[in-house]
Structures are given as C-alpha cells and as structure tokens.
Image (tube, rainbow, N blue to C red):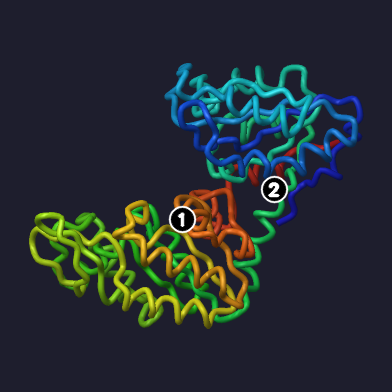
Amino acid sequence: MQLPQLEDLPDPSGKRVLLRADFNVPISDGRIEDDHRIRAALPTIEWLQDHGAKVTACSHLGRPKGKPDPKYSLDPVRERLDELAPGVELLDNLRFDPGEEKNDPGFVDRLVEGKDLYVNDAFGAAHRAHASIVGPPSRLPSAAGRLLAKEVEVLGGLLREPKRPFVAVLGGAKVSDKLGVIDALLDKVDRLLIGGGMCFTFFVARGESVGESLLEQERVDDCRRLLERAGDKIILPTDVVALGPGDEVRTAGTRLPDGWKGLDIGPGSAAEFADVVAGAGTVFWNGPMGMFEDDRFAAGTRTLAETVADAPGFTVVGGGDVVAAVDRFGAADRIDWVSTGGGASLEFLETGDLPGLEALRKAGNG
C-alpha cells in the first residue's frame, strides 16, 4: 500500500502542521497510567520539528458524546507531551465537538484553518471515518506519520507474505466483534485458536451447554457456519476454568452445568495453544484468553503471553485489551510488534484497508 510519507510533503520549514495523533491513554485520578501512545508519536513529531515545522496535535480521549466533559480532559496528556516534546500545541479533545464523529465539513474547516500540512499518525483511529481522520487530506497536503506507516507495513506483511505456519489467536468477550476477521483469516492462516468469552458461542454451535458463560445466541448459526467452513483450522479450548456457586473455582470440560460460568481457558487448552504458537512462523494475537484482571482467571492469558514472547516466529499483538495483558505479564518488550490499534488492526486484516488510509492515498500533495 503506497501511502504518502513525511518525505513526500512539501518543505515543512516554517509551516504549520496539523498532526492527528492517538493520545487515547488510560488516565486515573488525573494521572496517566501508560504513556506508550504519547511516546509512540515522538518519531513523527521530532522529524517535523527537526525540519522546522510548528506542530499542532489533536486527539480524542474516551467517549464524551459530543460535549465537553472534565473526565475526558486532555490536560494530563498536554502536560506529559510538553515534557516529551516541548513546543507542540495540543487542541482540546476532538470528541468534545459532535462534528468529529459526524465528519462534519464545518468542523474540518475549523481544524485545518491556519494550517499548511496534515499528518495522520493515529493508526488506532484510522478505521473511523471521523472528521479529523478523513477530512484534512481533502484540504491539505498530507502524509502518514512514522507510526501509522509502520503499522501498515507490519500488518500488511501478515496479509502478503507471512512466514508459515501462520497462526492467529483470537480472544476477548464478544464473537460478534470478530466474525468478519475470522471469516477473512480462515483464507490466510494455517491455524486459528479461539479463546476468551467468545469461545462459548462456538461451544453452543457444537451442541454443548455453557451454563452461565457469556453467550451470543444470535451468533450461534454464524459460528456453526464458520466451524463447518474451517475444517481443522479452528482450534477451540478443551477445558475451561469456571466460577460456580459460592465463588467456587474449578477446571472443567467444555460442557458446563447451570450456575457455572467459564472465565478462562483451562491448563490443558493453554498448553495445547502454546504448542501451536511455539511452532509458528508468524503469530497474530488479539484478545485475552480470560478475565486476566482477576488472578483466578489469568493463567491462560499469562501462558499465552509468555509463549508468544518466547516464540521463534514473527509475533504481533493486535492492540486492544491484550496489550494491557502482555504489559502486566512482562512480555511486551519481547514481542516483535505491539500494535496501537485493536479495532483498527482487526479491520485492516479483514478488509486490507481503512478509511484513514484511503483518505491519505487520495490526498493532493502538490
């Protein structure tokens, strides 16, 4: 995918650049808990400043629903950004204005007013056709920032030429969020491991009972269709860790009685998944294997994090909650690429494109 790069911009010296960044960082009691996304934008910011540009950054934070909300103030981000990249201005939370999510042309006008160039470095928001993502490239010479370009290079490589065997691991709560990417990946991967809450809808599609476990009944037929299509490509857990009456925790098979709720893959499944991952040439992982925030249901995700980190193949973690998991278990710095976009990485693997990337390709950079 040929995206315009920073070097393709007109000379930025003395120019005012609007930088769409993804500073949607976790904040608690006014303090940033993880500044990774801020630091990830520094290579782009430094290149622009080194070439004489004045940078104005913009980002969303949370879901303030189109109106100012102190809970979603970017002030802590502004303070940290000033420490890391002095001289960069940061606008208010884009989603304080309803025009952002509605892609309102008037809001785009206000964003680009007084600006000469536009750079999109917000891969985590590039799957949204929002004003700050798709609007400025139609008005200004535009380019992909370093982070966005690297995300597309890495994830594009998974689609074009992954080293075999190519293993994808999908978890998380809702299977409905991942049906499209499962369908697409079945044509590309050698094995597809499915854990997390989403596995229970697949169990029901096989005719099993899942007790009180998370279930999307309306997606059972979709899961049945995928299982029939996949043959032996899809590997489901063979045991789970479940919570029952009186807070009893036990390892069980994949058929659960009433009153029991599966909250992690079991040790047998974790070992089987680890064996498949360890033998892979390429690994893509999105979504935890269980409710890892609770130590009683963290073992499956921990085992997978350690295995992915130690795997000899090329390893990619596809953003979202699993990033917090690999950080918690000390595995992040041993994984080849940790994406900044959960939903964006899945949509890119599903469709091969994103609204923000299309907008950049159409930009007039003369």
Which quadrant holds residue 258? bottom left
Question: x, y percentage for residue 150?
Answer: 70, 54
Q: Secondary structure at mark 2?
A: helix
Identity of the amino acid at label 2? Answer: Leu
Q: Residue at x 52, y 19 (%)?
A: 97
Q: Is residue 163 left or right of residue 177?
A: right
Q: Secondary structure at mark 1?
A: helix
How many numbered circles are shown? 2
Disc sitting over residue 147 in the figure: 2
* On screen, residue 86 above or below 362: above
Judging by the rendered image, the residue that carries numbered circle 1 is 325
Which quadrant holds residue 152? bottom right
Q: Residue at x 79, y 24 (%)?
A: 87
* On screen, residue 104 above or below 212: above
Tell me how far mark 2 sits from mark 1, CA to CA: 22 Å
State which tag comes first along the sequence, 2 or 1.
2
Quadrant in which the N terminus is drawn: bottom right
Residue 175 seen in the current view? no
Question: x, y percentage for residue 116?
Answer: 81, 25
Disc sitting over residue 254 in the figure: none
Residue 141 seen in the current view? yes
